[in-house]
């Protein structure tokens, strides 16, 4: 059985509710979508309410560490992926 979102490190009940709205209910779902895709879907659904910290938190959760423990290189890599994979509205 996969770990529930709210039981993962960095991701509590509020994040679990938001992720549930985009059909991510457990660790397997998050891994399947990938943190960058999950971040884009959250941004689309919730707008400015979702910050870059959500991306870091999800990435760190899948690594089993605190998001503040992510090194600068990892954070930069996540930001670059999120920027590169962003699709303009109406495409895709």
Image: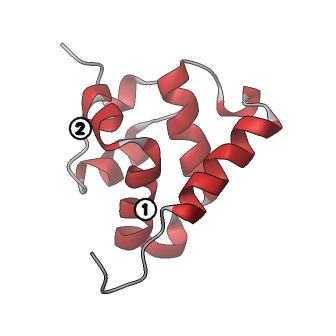
Residue 50 vs 7, above or below: the answer is: below
Looking at the rendered structure, the secondary structure element under dot 1 is helix
Looking at the rendered structure, the secondary structure element under dot 2 is loop
Query: Which of 40/10 is in front?
Result: 40
Residue 78 vs 58, above or below: the answer is: below
Residue at point 20%, 49% (across, down): 23
Judge left or right: residue 78 versus residue 9. right
Judge left or right: residue 71 versus residue 1. right
Residue 83 image offset from top left, x and y in percent: 59, 64
Residue at point 78%, 38% (across, down): 73
Query: Which of 7/65 is in front?
Result: 65
Residue at point 55%, 49% (across, down): 54
Q: How many marks?
A: 2
Residue that label 1 marks: 40
Specify the quadrant that holds the C terminus: bottom left
> Of callouts 2 and 1, which one flags the residue occurring earlier in the amino acid sequence?
2
Mark 2 → mark 1, Cα distance in angstroms: 16 Å
Residue that label 2 marks: 25
Q: Which mark is residue 90?
A: none
Q: Residue furthest top?
A: 1
Location of residue 5 by image quarter:
top left
Judge left or right: residue 5 versus residue 47. left
Residue 13 image offset from top left, x and y in percent: 38, 40
Residue at point 28%, 36% (across, down): 32
Tell us which disc is closer to us: 2 or 1.
Answer: 1
For mark 2, does the 10 Å Cα neighbourhood hold few (<14), some (14 to 19), or many (20 or more) residues? Answer: some
Residue 87 vs 80, above or below: the answer is: below
Query: Which of 17/86 is in front?
Result: 86
């Amino acid at each position: 059985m996969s770990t529930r979102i709210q039981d993962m490190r960095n991701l509590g009940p509020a994040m679990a509710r938001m992720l549930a709205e985009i059909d991510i209910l457990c660790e397997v779902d998050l891994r399947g979508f990938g943190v960058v895709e999950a971040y884009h879907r959250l941004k689309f659904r919730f707008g400015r309410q979702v910050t870059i910290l959500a991306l870091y938190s999800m990435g760190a959760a899948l690594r089993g560490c605190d998001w503040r423990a992510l090194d600068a290189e990892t954070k930069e890599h996540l930001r670059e992926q999120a920027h590169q994979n962003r699709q303009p509205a109406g495409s895709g």
